[in-house]
Amino acid sequence: MKLAKTVAEVKEAVRQWKKEGLSIGLVPTMGYLHEGHKCLIDRAVKENDRVIVSDFVNPIQFGPKEDLASYPRDIEADCKLCEDSGADIVFNPEVEEMYAENFTTFVDTTGVTEELCGKSRPTHFRGVCTVVSKLFNISEADRAYFGQKDAQQLAVIRRMVRDLNMNIEIIGCPIIREKDGLAKSSRNTYLSKEEREAALVLSKAINAGKKMIEEGERDGDKVLSEMRKIVEQEKLARIDYIEMVKWDSIEIHHKVDQPVLVAMAVFIGKTRLIDNFIWE
Ligand code: AMP
């Protein structure tokens, strides 16, 4: 496995692979890899001849008051996980390699980015779409793998690929959780022991909402109000949002009468965690 620091190194490998007629899978990540990421990499390895894992904390998807500086990093451990999983390249560029001083081109997907995380992080998806477009161009991948953990991101990327006729298949993968239910996240490392305990309130609310719908409840507001009640019982939790939206368009929706995404962002202390479920 190769650790590539430059765009040119990746492009050179891709050129060779294309000449040999090999298929390429891409797994975009911000590093500090865990089993959620591993699940995407394993699937990419299974479905493609060659796999590139990008490992890049993308500054332009962070807001000015967010955790860019403190975001956890461990490239050595990441490389080991990627090598053990059978990836071929870990692409870990410096910021200057991805964004030249006079970088002025952005990809802005509207509509699907307005609700949920787009509301509290207004420049986030513009940063995501821009870096993901660059990674698609650099890797010339046939398939790219994204987790349902970031469900709105998955919907936004699908929309971008459709709208801009990008030649790539987007594969969504299920949420991987800790044994006690907490969705795995690089940001879980921020949690103190007490906060880690309190963070269970997210998956508790997710399970309760899912159960209500499975048992026949079709009034979205009733489901959300039960979920909010559960989260509000936890002293260390502060709700950013708990909403139901149409799964394809990410528009607020009140009835469970079509595929819906029920999603939440909750601060546990200073750490903002997300979780969701999709009902189809
Ligand atoms: P990140 O490094 O947090 O930007 O995540 C990179 C990719 O891994 C995204 O597509 C995420 O949705 C996915 N991912 C992160 N955590 C999980 C998880 N617990 N289960 C499944 N996918 C995940």
Image (tube, rainbow, N blue to C red):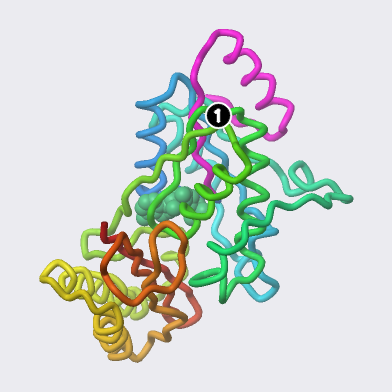
Quadrant assignment, res 225: bottom left
User: Of helix, strand and loop, which one carries label 1?
Assistant: loop
Q: Residue at x 45, y 35 (%)?
A: 82
For the C terminus, give its image quadrant.
Answer: bottom left
Q: Nearer the viewer, residue 263 or 78?
A: 263
Do we see residue 212 in this rendering? yes
Q: Position of residue 71 (x, y in %)?
A: 57, 62
Q: Residue at x 21, y 59 (%)?
A: 179
- Is residue 265 highlighted in magenta? no
Do we see residue 150 in this rendering? no
Residue extending farthest to the left is: 215
Q: Position of residue 184 (x, y in %)?
A: 36, 58
- Is residue 16 highlighted in magenta? yes
Q: Residue at x 30, y 65 (%)?
A: 182
Q: Nearer the viewer, residue 224 or 134?
A: 224
Q: Which residues are magenta?
A: 1-29
Quadrant assignment, res 2: top right
Q: Is residue 206 above or below residue 158?
A: below
Q: Residue at x 37, y 78 (%)?
A: 195
Q: Position of residue 206 (x, y in %)?
A: 26, 71
